[in-house]
Image (cartoon, coloured by chain):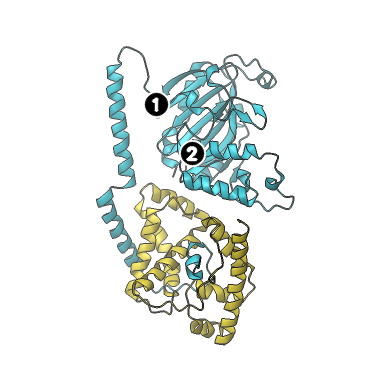
Amino acid sequence: MLDMFALIAVRRGDDAALEQLISKYTPYVTTVIRGVGDGSITVEDVEEIASDVFFALWQNVGKPNPLKLKAYLGQIARNKAKNRLRSRKEELPFEDDWIADEGETLVDGLTRESEQNAVKSAVLSLSEPDREIFLRHYYQLQTVTMIADEMKMGESAIKHRLDRGRLKLKAILIKGGNSNE
Amino acid sequence: MNKKISDIMDCVEYYPLSIQEEKTQSAKRIVNLTMKKITAEKAVTGSYTQRRTRKSFASAAIAAVLVVALAGTAFAIYQFSLKDLAGPTQIGTEQVRTFSLNGFKESPEYEAAQEWESYVNARINEEENMAAPDLVPDAYSQYNAFSEEAKDTLDGILNKYDLKMHDTPSYVHSLDELYSGLGVSGFMPALGNNGEYPVSGTFYEDGTFSFNSAAAASNGTDVRYQFYNFTKGALTRSGYLLADADDFEEWVYKTESGVEILLGISENKSVMAANLDNNFVFINILSGTKNNDSSRTSFGANPVEKSDLEALADSFNLAALNALAR
């Protein structure tokens, strides 16, 4: 069943349609969850988080664009996994996560949608492999060591490319903040 | 203000990197866990469907009491009239009387449409919001929001009324295409011209659709109409119908599918409007009691009577449309 029709059916209270969606997207959602952080999420945690993702889908079945359901579920899965790590007070292994220095005005004047669009624009403007590295680190929350290992690159090269991505994001967001003055 | 990149990325709905999906987790266990949470939620709050049913029953009970109290007066109890459709009175520099197609007054869809159209009309000649020749259309384009300021304003209105924006529409050229796109069929009447009348329309992911068609009227002629079905919860840019409620005789009719619909007939056009649980339906019929203006005589449209409108209303299965909407 196409996602659009399945979502319509779920909205009408069709549990079988929801089960179909869960079966279809479980491999993807669980892979996203396992990919968050340094791989320390247990099997039980993965199942629990995945069920939270699909429960969130049921609660908000009107929200996702049926043509982008996979991306929507991926975003939810990523955020819920990140929150689980934070709730366990595990340090999320970021390289210079902060985007602004003291004294700079950043994104205050931007709406949430503008901010989202600015970030997406910045990320999409990165060339490969910088884009992949940036997303692995700040979206999938992978450590530099993991990224270096999976992409067969040196850790200092990874850090250098992350630095370039941060500078680019910062430039776009600061420009957006200044344009509202 | 400092922001964490990892937190900014929370709100990015980014299509993930291609990943090798690993089927190491049992979907069945996740299904069971999810359904347990849903069952627990329903036990606490009641399902969405159940809440809707209780509300409808309460409304019907109150309406029934009022009908009994007014027995003998021949009033039909309906909470809206055509005056509740009144739309903008100025389009560009022209003073007009209009009907909004987005819903009855005070509904979030109606109010949001009014605000957005006021914004667009006030800037209709501003170059900043003109579409550039090399514009790559996006979802905002259908709302005439081309500049960043316009997009931000539209987003603000959508947030204010808790409405969604549609994605790009799909186009249909037959009833079969419309039924196929929506996943539900049989809710429209037979086409005029012995089933050969051309259909053109659009639909969105949430069941919102509009299309132009004609049905065979009881007097043996075709009645042309424009059908709009708007799922509640989204802002649909549909334009306005030039119409003045004072020109119409209106009445409430209960269709064969059990849905009450507001009908209006005037000399050159007729309208139907139904405020259903999940959607708003508006039908503009391109015929009235006389058809004596050039837009009707040039097409040779035959006049219609009240009974023709009631028969046309019966031919739409509005109960099925209410179930379709999301």
Q: Is residue A29 visible?
A: yes
For chain B, what colour was chosen?
cyan
Q: Hey, which quadrant is residue B23 in on the image?
A: bottom left
Query: Where does the image place residue B204, in percent across and percent down from the top left?
Result: 54, 45
Count of labels in the image: 2
Query: Where does the image place residue B135, in percent across and percent down from the top left?
Result: 70, 52
Q: Is residue A36 above or below residue B322?
A: below
Q: Earlier in the sequence, mark 1 or mark 2?
A: 1
For chain A, what colour was chosen?
yellow
The image's mark for residue B109 is: 2
Query: Where does the image place residue A169, in percent across and percent down from the top left?
Result: 59, 69
Mark 2 belongs to which amino acid?
Answer: Glu
The residues bearing labels 1 and 2 have C-alpha atoms spaced at a distance of 17 Å
Q: Nearer the viewer, residue A4 or B214?
A: A4
Label 2: which secondary element: helix
- Pointer 2 local density, CA inside 10 Å: few below 14, some 14–19, many at least 20: many
Query: Where does the image place residue A159, in percent across and percent down from the top left?
Result: 56, 82
Q: Is residue A96 above or below residue A104?
A: below
Label 1 is found on which chain of the structure? Answer: B
Q: Nearer the viewer, residue B163 or A4?
A: B163
